[in-house]
């Protein structure tokens, strides 16, 4: 194991001396985590810019306006009093939604006739659209209940009778796991897993391609050191830093961004261990195949977004074509992202993620096997270098 320790020591020294690699290993994961945390820190949409076109300007219509003004969900934009002005504000982006109160609003209500309040909202962004729809229905529903209660009180009904009339059937709703509907709780853990994967793959991949570009990889291939020792020595520093970044990002999410991170600590560590082993081994195998650092970087950048899209973290796998689902099951991110949500957000135990653990274990074993048993006889694609067969001899000279 002295040879493994010597190679690992050399690799660690190189990480500390190479400023770019040092930043990539230690600073970039936290920088990405901070950026994602700042973006999703609020978690909920508030102060949504709303325009109200009051064509009635009556006592009841002003009560509707006041209900929206008093809602923490909306920020009423002044100076828009026509439908054309509302339309222009929507196009310019100064407002995201509008409420149009008809001119006969109070007349119809006092005559006990149905009336409509038009609500328009920008659904080009689903986050805006879905939340605005929910919030406007809440405000209008509250206004309806208050007006109906006042009318029934005028008829002489008691408070209990009014409450029973308004709530003949009560919907008792319990929201589990993410009661505040925080977008940060929903998305952040998946983003952190893709950050760990991409940074981990990139760092360990560059370690071999860098040696190839310098033609120093030949020294390893031609040395009497066993292939498995080369893999362990080269990969161990990156495995440890990847595991460290995993713990750091979880701590950052819980303590700084204040997202929900619960669940068994041992289970979280087990998932991180399997994930880091898989990423490190896969990155090493990728570097053996790649000709240079640019090729590795290009492929990882190209595949990072598709990997996240097909993982099923943002869009339910039940609504993704089966062919894509089958491809996604070959990716460690798919199993890790789902498991991290089930454990840290839903606080579920090991028996709920047995399939995830088994899948990650198989991937870790397979990728590690190929990394441990890579062939030293392989002819490396050195830049303009010699074709080398270093199984038992040194490179032949021309």
Image: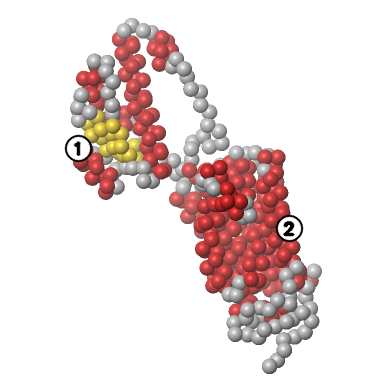
User: Does any portion of residue 268 appear in the rendered image?
Assistant: yes
* x and y percentages locating residue 262 in the rendered image: 61, 41
Please tell me the numbered disc located at residue 365: 2
Quarter-of-image position of residue 375:
bottom right
* Residue at image location 38% in from the left, 8% down from the top: 158
Question: From the viewer's perspective, is 167 left or right of 395?
Answer: left
Question: From the viewer's perspective, is 96 left or right of 318?
Answer: left
- Above or below, 13 against 254 in this view is below
Are the residues tagged 1 and 2 within 8 Å (C-beta)? Answer: no
Question: Distance between the Cα atoms at labels 1 and 2?
Answer: 66 Å
Q: Neighbour class for label 1 at 10 Å: few (<14), some, many (≥20)?
A: some
Q: Which residue is mark 1?
A: 82
Label 1, secondary structure: give it: loop
Quarter-of-image position of residue 95:
top left
- Above or below, 351 against 308 in this view is above
- Above or below, 114 against 40 in this view is above
Which is nearer the eye, 120 or 228? Answer: 120
Which is nearer the eye, 348 or 12? Answer: 348
Q: Neighbour class for label 2 at 10 Å: few (<14), some, many (≥20)?
A: some
């Amino acid at each position: 194991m002295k040879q493994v320790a010597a190679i690992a020591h050399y690799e660690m020294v190189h990480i500390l001396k190479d400023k770019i690699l040092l930043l990539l290993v230690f600073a970039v994961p936290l920088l990405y985590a901070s950026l994602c945390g700042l973006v999703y820190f609020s978690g909920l949409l508030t102060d949504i810019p709303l325009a109200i076109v009051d064509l009635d300007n009556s006592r009841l219509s002003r009560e509707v306006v006041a209900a929206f003004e008093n809602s923490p969900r909306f920020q009423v934009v002044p100076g828009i009093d026509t439908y054309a002005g509302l339309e222009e504000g929507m196009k310019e982006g100064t407002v995201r939604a509008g409420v149009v109160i008809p001119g006969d609003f109070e007349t119809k209500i006092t005559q006990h006739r149905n009336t409509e309040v038009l609500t328009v909202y920008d659904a080009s962004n689903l986050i805006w659209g879905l939340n605005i729809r929910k919030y406007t229905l809440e405000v209008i529903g509250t206004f309806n209940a208050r007006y109906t209660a006042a009318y029934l009180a005028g008829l002489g009904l008691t408070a209990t009778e009014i409450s029973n009339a308004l709530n003949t059937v009560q919907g008792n709703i319990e929201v589990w796991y993410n009661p505040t509907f925080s977008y940060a709780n929903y998305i952040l853990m998946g983003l952190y897993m893709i950050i760990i994967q991409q940074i981990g793959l990139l760092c360990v991949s560059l370690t071999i391609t860098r040696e190839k570009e310098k033609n120093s990889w030949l020294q390893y291939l031609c040395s009497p050191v066993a292939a498995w020792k080369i893999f362990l020595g080269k990969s161990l520093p990156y495995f440890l830093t990847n595991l460290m970044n995993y713990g750091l990002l979880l701590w950052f999410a819980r303590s700084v961004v204040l997202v929900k991170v619960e669940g068994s600590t041992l289970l979280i560590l087990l998932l991180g261990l399997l994930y880091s082993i898989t990423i490190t081994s896969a990155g090493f195998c990728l570097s053996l195949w790649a000709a240079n650092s640019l090729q590795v970087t290009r492929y990882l950048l190209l595949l990072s977004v598709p990997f996240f899209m097909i993982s099923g973290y943002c869009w339910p796998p039940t609504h993704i074509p089966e062919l894509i689902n089958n491809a996604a099951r070959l990716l460690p991110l798919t199993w890790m992202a789902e498991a991290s949500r089930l454990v840290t957000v839903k606080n579920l135990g090991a028996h709920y993620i047995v399939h995830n653990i088994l899948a990650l274990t198989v991937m870790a074993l397979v990728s590690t096997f190929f990394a441990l048993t890579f062939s030293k006889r392989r002819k490396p694609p050195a830049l303009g270098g010699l074709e080398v067969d270093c199984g038992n001899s040194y490179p032949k000279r021309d």
